[in-house]
Image: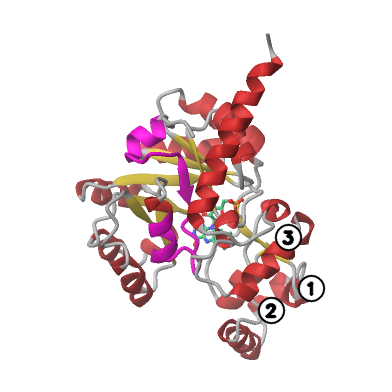
Amino acid sequence: MSNFDSALTRLLKTTNPVVLAPMGGASGGRLAAAVSRAGGLGLVGASYGDPDWMKTELELMKDVKQPWGVGLVMFTVAKRFELLELALSYRPSVVALSFGDARPFIAPIKQSGALAIVQVHDVDQALAALEAGADALIVQGAEAGGHSLRRASLPLIPAVRDAVGDEVVLIAAGGIADGRGLAAALLLGADGVMMGTRFLASEEALPSNKLKQRLVRATAGDTVRTRAFDLVRGIEWPEQYSGRALANDFTARWLGFEHELVKAPASVGEDYAQALREDNTQVRAIWAGEVADLVNDVLPAATIVEQTLRGAEQALRGARTLFD
Ligand SMILES: Cc1cc2nc3c(=O)[nH]c(=O)nc-3n(C[C@H](O)[C@H](O)[C@H](O)COP(=O)(O)O)c2cc1C
């Protein structure tokens, strides 16, 4: 395979442009380390920030010589700044911020010597994140697993590129699971890709094999967008965001009736917590994107990285034959 070089690899000092999404509950230290050791950027998914979980998983990054990072949800860190301080105490080279106002966090991240990368979902958010001082942007389309806004990746990536100019480093996320997706994202104006759902079906991801096999069997048509899993957990997501997850008994009950969850009896939340403890995939959320169609096996993370790079090289070299 040939060497890869883009503005993203130069910024991150990685050898390839594959970034592991900071998936809460899935991207632990073992998975992040595997992606970083494979030459990409592994992001530990600290998400809403459980300090004990963060300590356990970030401890695993101490032996990783390659660049790695941590992902945090901004509307949570806005209330609990100590979560950012905890993350920075492990000296990540990147902090990825999603969902919220980046302004309070950029300076402390940069002062620590880390890069501040912000996930955005439309052109206005992209411009605001740059204004706040972001070092790079993750441009996420609504095909993504987990939470997103409404815009699809295919037109969003070039629209953000046009709006921000050539110098800004862009990472495409949402709907990318293989080399074809990486090749397409590069041609649309991105400098690299972030993949979540594909890495959820990796050997190193934290969830059970039962959950991963459910994803392997699923197709894009099995995904739904809902706020039900947020409402039942009492997480105060801004209303415009919903999450894409696999349909199950829980979504069959609550999809379209999410407003009722707000005043549902406490037993509904207790039953959900019980389903989480029991890993009951018919009830618990399995966040997954439209690439469920393309995820047909559980692989070591390094194999996913390697196949993605190989596939992109093949796709891009093949495309050269289209014009003479
Ligand atoms: C299981 C799962 C959990 C996720 N958790 C988070 C999270 O905690 N924080 C976050 O910023 N994004 C989260 N995401 C979204 C990812 O960061 C990323 O934008 C998305 O996975 C990219 O789209 P893809 O799933 O098509 O690769 C999650 C995605 C998945 C699939």
Asked if residue 268 is positioned above or below residue 260 in the image, the reply reads below
Residue located at (56% from left, 76% from top): 233
For the residues labelled 3 and 2, the Cα–Cα distance comes to: 14 Å
Mark 1 or mark 2: whose residue is earlier in sequence: 1
Mark identifier at residue 232: none
Q: Quadrant of ligand 1?
A: bottom right
Does 15 sit above or below residue 5? below
The type of colouring in the image is: secondary structure
Q: Which residues are magenta?
A: 7-34
Residue at numbered disc 2: 283
Pointer 3 and pointer 2: residues touching (CB < 8 Å)?
no
Q: Camera-side residue: 276 or 225? A: 276
Q: CA distance from mark 1 to mark 2?
A: 10 Å
- Residue 88 is left or right of residue 6, and the answer is left
- Is residue 133 at least partly visible in the picture? no
Q: What is the C-alpha distance between the residues marked 1 and 3?
A: 12 Å
The answer to whether residue 30 is magenta is yes
Q: Residue at x 70, y 17 (%)?
A: 322
Percent from the top left, x then y, of residue 17?
A: 45, 39
Residue 140 position, x and y percent, is 56, 45
Residue that badge 3 annotates: 223
Task: Confirm whether the magenta stretch covers residue 31.
Answer: yes
Residue at the far bottom: name it. 267
Using the rendered view, name the quadrant where residue 141 is placed. Answer: top right
Q: Secondary structure at mark 1?
A: helix
Residue under label 1, please give it: 252
